[in-house]
Amino acid sequence: MTTPSLTTAQIDAVQSHIKKTWKTLTRSHEHLVQSAKDSKLDHSSETPWIIYISPLEDCPNVQTVLERSLSRQDMQRIQIRTLPPEPEAIQEHGLLYLPGPYVVPGGRFNEMYGWDSYFILLGLLHDGELELAQSQVDQLLYQVQHYGTILNSNRTYMLSRSQPPVLSMMVMALFQHTQDEQWLRSTVPLLEQFYYYWVVPPHLNPGTGLSRFYAFGEGPAPEVLFSERDEQGRSHYDRVKEYYQTFEIEDYDVNLYYDREKDELTSLFYKGDRTMRESGFDITNRFGPFSADILHYAPVCLNSLLYQMEQDLVQINEIFGNEDLVQQWRERAEIRRQRIHQFLWDEEHGLYLDYHFQSGERRRYEFATTFYPLWLGIASPSQAQRLVENLSLFEAPGGIFTSTRVTGNQWDAPFGWAPLTLIAVQGLHRYGYHTEGDRIANKFLAMVVKEFGRHNTLVEKYDVQRCSANVSSEICFGYSSNEVGFGWTNGVILELLAASQKKG
């Protein structure tokens, strides 16, 4: 079966490339020196890379394991330390130890990322990489146990923030393949721990009962200061200040985020900046310029994912016959569904929109996360119909626009991303809109395969207006590179191809 406009040879070439790429994107003990390298921080070539071990670990045992896995020369290129009890006191950043192999996104992202891992997992399962898929999930469970949550990534400077919660979906996707009930039972305490990370303050907004993103760190993000510089050497934060000096901001009170007299960004700006990175959408103007106002919003995406987590815990407890717990989780999911309907559904515009706690209003910023409630079965049939009537806002020659605004940020128009494309496509299919779902999937596949033929790589993001992987000149804030790999693009392509071939 081939998708329209694609030949079997083209599809085979992409699938073969992805199959090989899993190996190059895998990090394990044998690759520890390679894993420890971090292009996002300033580092002297003579200085060893630091590996931090969880204080809950048996550190001498880890040292022995690593000495067996690495050459003496490689052991001299790293330095092993125990993670201090107060990670914010760390002056020298490093890699956080994980005991098993994991797949990284690629390029500058040479570590394990939270929500990337779900889409990577889908690809590993399609490619029959069951052992690596198992390890991918187990490393995230290890993070919850040893580092308190699933981290933005396993670097010390990201200990203070998480990423969109997709852990329970990963557990269930893997269980479908293994049917390992003993393992599934072992995940429940860690799933619950991760769930409660999101549903108590400061992540919980008590007034609505909905959750928000909230990063715990303070001040500029270290990796942004060093690595997100333009050709003139200005950091991302320098460019933000220049923007605030130049433009009137109507989306929020800019004085909260920028001190014009001192020409300084405020502590609240940096808190919002870190929190935007926890959301996974860095950078976008979804919550005002640079998403500085994100702390004041209940996001559609986060609360939809928490609903799914509640539903997954219903399903897990059904498997083990825990009827009382089934009922408790079912009630939680239903309460969240009602709150999503009350606060996040905008009847006038026929879209799910993010809700501002202080103003009591939804922000009129059309963003592709509006499809999450379709994807996860939260929307009513009539709400789904309204969303489909608004599909033209987002539909692009190469799939789905991230938002309807061109801002110079990578998580806005004209850019499109594999995860948001898959979410929209699967959401449309879930509600019976197969023509629309197939059309968007085929557009995205055609673009990615065509660009693969041109560059022989799969990349992080695409300009879905021009159907091009060449995006750097259009991105003004944050990092402008288009990273090669690329983990979640690989996974989404395999998922879309499998769905297409099933229909054939």
Image: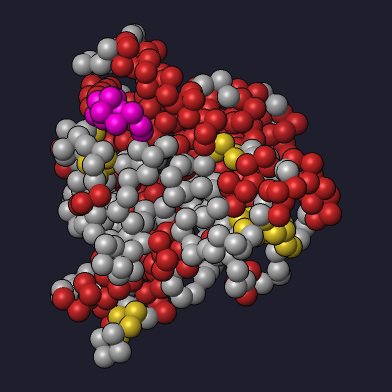
Q: Where is residue 278 in the image (x, y as percent from the top left)?
A: 46, 58
Observer-nearest residue: 451 or 174? 451
Per the rendered image, the range of residues in magenta is 447-458
In the image, residue 411 lies in the stretch drawn in magenta = no
Vertical comparison of 38 with 167: above or below? below
Frontmost residue, 52 versus 149: 52
Q: Give the mark count.
A: 0
Q: Where is residue 297 in the image (x, y as percent from the top left)?
A: 36, 63
**Residue at the spot 33% in from the left edge and 53% down from the top edge:** 344
Residue 496, by quadrant, is top left
- Main SS class of the magenta portion in the image: helix
Check the image and report above or below for 335 versus 217: above
Q: Is residue 142 visible?
A: no
Quadrant, the N terminus: top left
Give the residue at x 28% y 62%: 230
Residue 25: image x %, image y %?
Answer: 52, 36
Closer to the camera in the image, 176 or 273: 273
Q: Which of 258 and 476 is in front in this view?
A: 476
Answer left or right for 419 relative to 201.
Answer: left
Left or right of 43, for residue 86: right
Asked if residue 421 can be seen in this view, the reply is: yes
Image quarter of residue 132:
top right
Colouring mode (rainbow / by chain / secondary structure / one colour):
secondary structure
Q: Quadrant of the C terminus?
A: top left
When the figure is inspected, residue 407 is found, relative to residue 1, above or below; the finding is: below
Q: In this view, does 176 lie to the left or right of 377?
A: right
Residue 109 lies, in percent from the top left, at 47, 48
Residue located at (20% from left, 51% from top): 473
Q: Which residue is drawn at 52% across and 34% down?
A: 24
The relative height of residue 40 versus residue 320 in the rendered view (above or below) is below
